[in-house]
Amino acid sequence: MFMSTRSGVISTLVELVRKTLNHDPLVFVNSGLVVVGLITSLRSAANVLYTYAENICLSTVHVRAEDPLYEDVVRWMNDHAFRGRNFLSVLAQTNNNSDKPLRCPVQLDPDRLISYRESEDNSFLELKPFRGSRLFRFRQTWMLFSHAANGPGCFGPPQLDTNPPLKLQCLSISLSPIKKFLDEVRAYGRKVSVSNVTIYRTTSFSPDVVRWSSVASRLSRDISTVILDKQKKQTILRDINEYLHPHTRQWYANHGIPYRRGYLFSGPPGTGKTSLASAIAGVFGLDIYVLSLLDPSMTESHFSRLFSEVPTRCVVLLEDVDAAGLNRGDTEPGEDFIQRSTKTNTSVSLSGLLNAIDGVSSQEGRILIMTTNAPQQLDRALIRPGRVDVHIKFELPSREELQDLFLSMYSEVHQNPQFSPDEQKTEAARLTEQAVRFAECLPEKQFSIADIQGFLLQHKRRPEDACSQVESWVEEMDFEE
Ligand SMILES: Nc1ncnc2c1ncn2[C@@H]1O[C@H](COP(=O)(O)OP(=O)(O)OP(=O)(O)O)[C@@H](O)[C@H]1O
């Protein structure tokens, strides 16, 4: 009964369409089926052809997200192949890294507060091509750049926080066109970031996936702005200079010694350990890879993998190594000390740390800098030669260092280009005299440079105020302690 009603409705509908269009509707249905079939067959044929071509005449190079090359390729594509082209799917981001100085609406007047809401903002909106495939031409060769959204077969919004690898392809039986492209990309990356230091930190994408990601690219700190005993500064610079020299690498290889060098920077907080590490990276044109043993997402296997994934020449900065509490504890003679650790604040064991530093998979050519406030708490195994080759002790500043800090803070005062050379000389002499006075008002080896810098920052442009108020600041600080 129900069946006969339904077939009745269908035949009425077919009759209606036939009368309206003057054609048999089944012809449309059949034609539609043929078109769909054709499209499906063409797509499968294209897929087969593509796979075939990929195997025999398409060169393909994959670039993993954690490799520094990834950033270089993306930067090159944005600055060249994507420039001036319209894209419908882009990643919008606020770029705060502009080096352009903020134009100030009015002259600085200490008694007049300025609201910047209405003023020019030096951050800008960047729209970057994000995911998808783009065909572009590099030196007469067509190349395909692909940046997948999600894994194959996934629907939904793209995962913005995970970076799948990049794919570069070109129609060639040799990899040489892509290799040339990558050489160009690297050279461009070096040119753009010549005076910058890129800082990489670990990012946890999931409990199993912890990767290096670049978190900042900054103008490198001038080594002369780091206040440290000249002898110590020279020692470390000479040592690193010699270590990085290509002949040294060969020397290590000839003598069968693993090509690695480690430095320990110890001293009270705020004395310049991290500042020196970043200035060193700037001097030698290296990037910094920061690792923390206290990172809750850091397991022992992540730690050793990340250590082995850093590039050949870079600074690996392991900050506050003492804070992890890694040491062997009190051991009986002959006891396997590495297994017996005292209570720690990290899931990386002492043996895991030692293995990462100089195990077989540890990267050669890198510079390891460990910083600590309490070197006496470090296990001897961690700081033995081979793991720590040079120990630089940072101290609270001496009188001479206090003067250096003062002069470095107010260097623009006498270098003012509006002064004649004679005026500059007079100003320089006055500043030196103020620096001596300032340093005499401060007790030696009591405050850290960070403390004193904090005070000087309150008088950025007025060295005479810093001189006249430093005594009361010392009294205040003594009282607080
Ligand atoms: N020796 C120094 N020369 C120049 N600036 C310094 C020096 N020491 C500290 N500072 C200033 O103090 C601040 C903190 O310095 P930094 O982070 O390098 O100290 P640190 O010794 O690494 O401290 P912590 O042990 O707490 O990590 C920075 O702004 C830095 O400019």
Image (cartoon, rainbow, N blue to C red):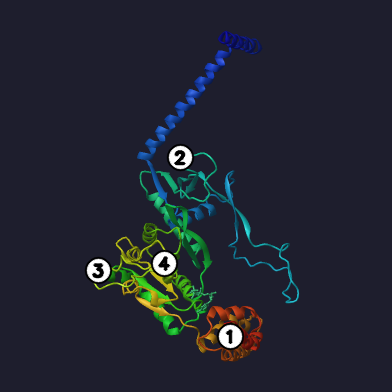
Q: Which residue is mark 2?
A: 152
Q: Earlier along the polypeptide chain: callout 1 or callout 4?
A: 4
Q: Earlier along the polypeptide chain: callout 1 or callout 2?
A: 2
Q: Which residue is mark 4?
A: 316
Please, what is the three-letter code of the amino acid marked with disc 1? Asp
Please, what is the three-letter code of the amino acid marked with disc 2? Pro
User: Where residue 445 sits: x, y (%)?
Assistant: 50, 86
Q: Nearer the viewer, residue 332 or 280?
A: 332
**Local SS, label 1:** helix
Q: Is residue 222 visible?
A: yes
Disc 3 versus disc 2: nearer the observer: 2
**Local SS, label 4:** strand
Quadrant position of residue 347 = bottom left
Work out how far the residue at label 1 is from the one at label 3, CA to CA, in angstroms: 55 Å
Q: Which residue is mark 1?
A: 478
User: Where residue 426 sits: x, y (%)?
Assistant: 63, 90
Q: Is mark 2 within 8 Å of ligand 1?
A: no
Q: Nearer the viewer, residue 255 or 464?
A: 464
Please, what is the three-letter code of the amino acid marked with disc 3? Gly
Q: Is residue 268 above or below residue 103?
A: below
Contact? badges 4 and 3 (CB < 8 Å)? no
Work out how far the residue at label 3 is from the one at label 2, CA to CA, in angstroms: 46 Å
